[in-house]
Image (cartoon, helix red, strand yellow):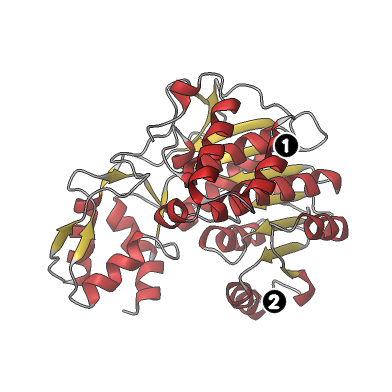
Amino acid sequence: MHQNQFLADPATLAQLLGKSTEPTYSAAARASIKGRSVLVTGAGGSIGSEIVRQVHRLSPGPVYLLDHDEGALHSLQVELNGHGLLDDDRTVLADIRDGHTMHRLMEQIRPDIVFHAAAHKHLPLLERYPAEGVKSNLIGTANVVAAAANAGTTTFVNISTDKAAAPSSVLGATKRLAERVVAAWAGSSMQVASVRFGNVLGSRGSFLPTLHWQLSNGLPVTITDPRITRFFMTIPEAAGLVIEAGEMAQAGETYVLDMGDPVSIEDLVRRFAVALDAEPQIVYTGLRPGEKLHEELLDSIENLTSTRHPRVSAVTANGPAQIALLDEVDRIATAAAVLGTEELRELLWDLLHSTAAHSHDLVGAR
């Protein structure tokens, strides 16, 4: 079976995770989408494109796709056009890091709902190039949420990551600050929330495609540590729960998805090798800068409370987000263009600490 077919096969992924992965929708989620205009940023990516597909199942109004990757955007456009789901004028090639463009586009589109999935997510690369993480994950998010609010958007859902809990990496720090930037718009006429979840099986550039390539070509499989674990979901599962969490967005909450128990990476490798009828040769490389042995869902100052959806919990004790944070984002935007890597990293961490009620509890080891 071709790699793309293999990784997209629900039965294969369900077998690897040992659970059902097909999304279902509550009546409230269906009602929240029906007839409403929707914009998805990062629409060409694994999560963004799946949100687009699933939104189309829920009888929306016009759906707009925004991405900076022209190839990914075109591929999704062709797929949706083939099913009669998309007009060409609803694909938008743009960079979220351009604030003026975001405001102009939002005024033209005036979406009711925004799912903000655009981000840089490769942890080791962002450790080497923190300015790119700052510009996309932090400044880009600030641009999109401000433009949406000014254009009259009623619901804004920010896609976050479990690495935003007790962040130990540039990825985690920028995504945690992005959560706070979104929450700073609470109290406006727009309902806002962020959604945290872990690794997504089969997403572009993620662990599983790399593993498939290594095993299929008889190459050594690289694992950082024999004890390492991660939380995993499938792409359809994560996107469906994002839609459910978005329906509950109100005043800057952060929602955490139920991802089940942490999965041993080595166990996952061996199960995947069986599915491919391959014999893995495992090489341990050691943890990389910013990487954790075990991911966390919460900081030590946070707690989870239940919601009306059994697989979506809300984070409490995050504390109110200050609107002044938006001025600090402007300051770090200027700094990102002129500071060296280490100076920018220090400024990023200073900003993270300044937003925390108890920074020694909130921030992971560096």
Q: In this view, does 261 lie to the left or right of 165?
A: left
Q: Residue at x 69, y 36 (%)?
A: 328
Q: Looking at the picture, which amino acid does disc 2 mark?
A: Gly
Q: Which mark lies nearer to you, 1 or 2?
A: 1
Residue 7: % across, % down: 37, 68
Q: Looking at the picture, which amino acid does disc 1 mark?
A: Leu
Give the camera-side residue of 329 and 102: 329
Residue wearing tag 1: 326
- Residue 207 is labelled as none
Give the quadrant of residue 122: bottom left
Q: Which residue is drawn at 76% across and 69% down?
A: 90
How far apart are the alpha carbons under marks 1 and 2?
Answer: 40 Å
Give the quadrant of residue 8: bottom left
Residue 305: % across, % down: 51, 23
Give the camera-side residue of 282 and 45: 282
Residue wearing tag 2: 84
- Crowding around mark 2 (Cα neighbors within 10 Å: few <14, some 14 to 19, many 20+) is few
Residue 344: % across, % down: 55, 45
In which quadrant will I find the N terminus? Answer: bottom left
- Tell me the SS state at disc 2: loop
Q: Which residue is drawn at 66% across and 62% down?
A: 56
